[in-house]
Image (tube, helix red, strand yellow):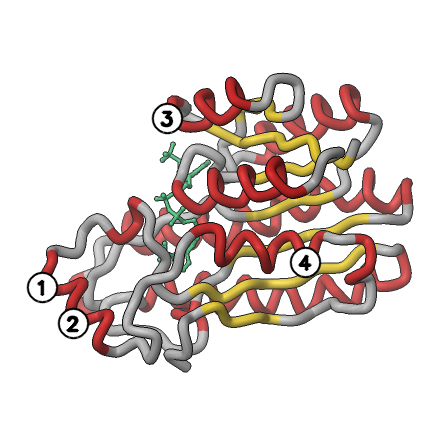
Amino acid sequence: MRSILITGGNGGLGLGIGRYFLDHEEDAKVWLGVRANRGNAEALAAEFPGRCVLVDLEVTSRESWETAVATIVETDGGIDVLVNNAGLHRDHLLAAMPDEAWSSVISTNLDAVFLGSRAVIRPMMTRRFGRIINIASLSAILPPLGQTNYAAAKAGVVALTQTLAKEVARAGITVNALLPGYIQTEALSHMDDEAAKRAKAGIPMRRFGSPAEVAVAVRFLACQDAGYVTGSALKIDGGIF
Ligand code: NDP
């Protein structure tokens, strides 16, 4: 069995990535990292008994990472794939940005990728195989107004990805980032119909992407044969950039 940990496993993209692995890879075992909300993840786990499991994971906590990774390594004998997917945004113009909006976005989107990557590197090195896939955002390279915090965090994730890729290249571990544009999940629920219409008008494909359209890229980067792809940052944005 391939052991795959996906953070933010109760959210739209985390669930979509988990389902994609479960549907397309018979020997995939998916660990969905969850914290407070877990209903969606439980429903997916019920569909795939024994192959989809929940694990408590607060991504901003070193202790939580250590416990979760130890549980997975003890149970499965190692960890093959980490998808750093948990994230949030708190948009404000910088002049009016509350400290908490800055720090929570940096810690959830950037610090967590550091903590998670560090937690899995040793078990991956032991087996001389690993795939780390970081869900950044198109905002890393094409930031909209109001996202200084989110754009800085996601650009940091891309830089972390490129640097770590070099550090672990000889250990059989690849590290890559994905830069999704608009993907239809709860994260877009703040948009009313008018805002969604305006956003779609700026997308050459004139539609939002689906979680499965990100998941297919995650699965490609996670596969054994993609071992020469590392340090990359792949846009999935319907042609915006
Ligand atoms: P959702 O809001 O649907 O899901 C986000 C998930 O992250 C939730 O499961 C949430 O858990 C979890 N999470 C947030 N903070 C923490 C934390 N401190 N510890 C553990 N889990 C946490 O968003 P998406 O699925 O759309 O987003 C997934 C990723 O994709 C994010 O990194 C986002 O930035 C990125 N992205 C999304 C885009 C989109 O258009 N949807 C575009 C570009 C990038 P809980 O439910 O418990 O809060």
Name the image quarter holding the C terminus: bottom left
The crowding category of the residue bearing disc 3, from other C-alpha atoms within 10 Å (few below 14, some 14 to 19, many at least 20), is few
The crowding category of the residue bearing disc 2, from other C-alpha atoms within 10 Å (few below 14, some 14 to 19, many at least 20), is few
Sequence-wise first label, 1 or 3: 3
Q: Residue at x 77, y 46 (%)?
A: 121
Q: Is mark 3 within 8 Å of ligand 1?
A: yes
Spot occupied by residue 26 in the image (x, y as percentages of width and height): 72, 35
Q: Is mark 1 within 8 Å of ligand 1?
A: no
Badge 1 is on which residue? 194
Dot 3 falls on a residue whose secondary structure is loop
Spot occupied by residue 179 in the image (x, y as percentages of width and height): 49, 66
The kind of residue tagged 4 is: Phe
- The CA span between labels 4 and 1 is 35 Å
Spot occupied by residue 130 in the image (x, y as percentages of width and height): 79, 49
- The CA span between labels 2 and 3 is 31 Å
Dot 2 falls on a residue whose secondary structure is helix
Badge 2 is on which residue? 198
Mark drawn on residue 37: 3
